[in-house]
Amino acid sequence: MSRYGIAEWYGRPLMSLTPAERCAYAAIAMGEAAPPVCPFRPMVCNKRGGVCSIQPYREADQRINGVAGEPVIVCPTRFEQDMIPRSYFQQNSWPFVRTSMTSHLIHSTTVGLIGGHPAPSD
C-alpha cells in the first residue's frame, strides 16, 4: 500500500534528512523557530509547514518502506522559481498545472484540523 507524505521539506529531500534535522524542521513548522531561506526564491520561506512537495511512499508496518512514485509540487513558490510565474505554465496549456486558493489535502485524524485550520462545522 502507498500513501502520500512529504517529499521536500524546506527545500530538502525528506529521505536525506537526519533525525535531528527532521526534529529541527518540525520545530520550525510548529512556529518554535525561524524558517530558513527558500532555496527556490531569495526569501525566507513563508509557507506554513514548509512542505515544498509530496510523493507516494510504500508503507509497511506503519513505516516508510521506500518511494512509490514521483514528487508532486504543492508550494506555489516552486512554480515561481527562476522568476517564471505560474501563469506562464497555464497560458501554455500545461495540463498538469492547477492552482487552488485552498487545499484540503492534509486532514488530521487526531485533532480535527484540515490543512492546519479547524474543520468546517456541519
Image (spheres, rainbow, N blue to C red):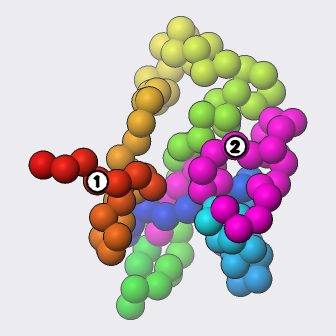
Where residue 53 sits in the image (x, y, percent)? 58, 50
Seen as rendered, the residue at the extreme top is 91
Magenta residue check for 40: yes
Does 55 sit left or right of 24 as displayed? Answer: left
Where residue 116 sits in the image (x, y, percent)? 45, 55
Q: Which residues are magenta?
A: 31-57
Residue 17 shows up from this direction = no
Q: Which residue is mark 1?
A: 119
Which residue is painted at 71% across and 68% down in the image? 32
Q: Which residue is mark 2?
A: 46
Residue 61 position by quadrant: bottom left
Tell me the quarter of the image containing the N terminus.
bottom left
Q: Quick one: SS at disc 1?
A: loop
Does 102 sit left or right of 24 as displayed? Answer: left
Disc tally is 2
| Earlier sequence position, callout 2 versus callout 1 | 2
User: What amino acid type is highlighted by mark number 1?
Assistant: Ala
Front one among 55 and 74: 74
Residue 88 position by quadrant: top right
Front one among 109 and 16: 109
